[in-house]
Image (cartoon, grey):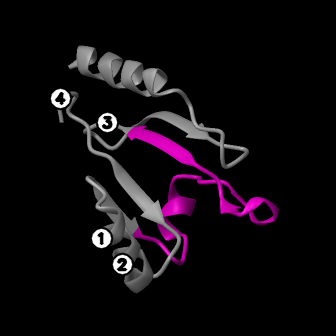
Amino acid sequence: MKRGARVIVLGPENMEHFSLWWLEQRMPFTGIPDPRHRIARLYGQPANFWKLGRMPLIVIVDKNGNIRMRHRAKLPSDIPPIKKIITALDELNEEG
């Protein structure tokens, strides 16, 4: 919370499977099962069923609910460097 941000992860599994996996992995942030892809569609998460389903999506939403950064992956390995995410958070915090 140093940067005033929360990490929320969506999973495509149902509540039972998602919760079990989440607990086994001891994830340190909030996880939300989204088996019907409602939240994923709301934020425009890409899906490519020929490449293992949902692609990674990173969204930074400000306190007013405005999307300030969005990275839609084309491949499962397409994740931006953490420095890019931290820079976006720092810029948002500088705005106040």
Residue 93 on image: x %, y %: 25, 21
Residue 63 on image: x %, y %: 25, 38
Q: Give, as a single range, the part of the protein colored magenta.
A: 33-60
What residue appears at the point 26 percent right and 16 percent down from the top-left corner? 95
Residue to which mark 2 is pinned: 20
Residue 50 magenta: yes
Q: Earlier in the sequence, mark 4 or mark 1?
A: 4
Marks 3 and 2 close (CB-CB < 8 Å): no
Q: Amino acid at mark 2?
A: Leu
The Cα atoms of the two marked residues, 4 and 3, are separated by: 15 Å
Q: Amino acid at mark 3?
A: Asp
Residue to which mark 1 is pinned: 23
Q: Earlier in the sequence, mark 4 or mark 3?
A: 4
Q: Nearer the viewer, mark 4 or mark 2?
A: 2
Marks 4 and 1 close (CB-CB < 8 Å): no
Residue 5 magenta: no
What residue appears at the point 20 percent right and 33 percent down from the top-left corner? 4
Residue 79's image quarter?
A: top right
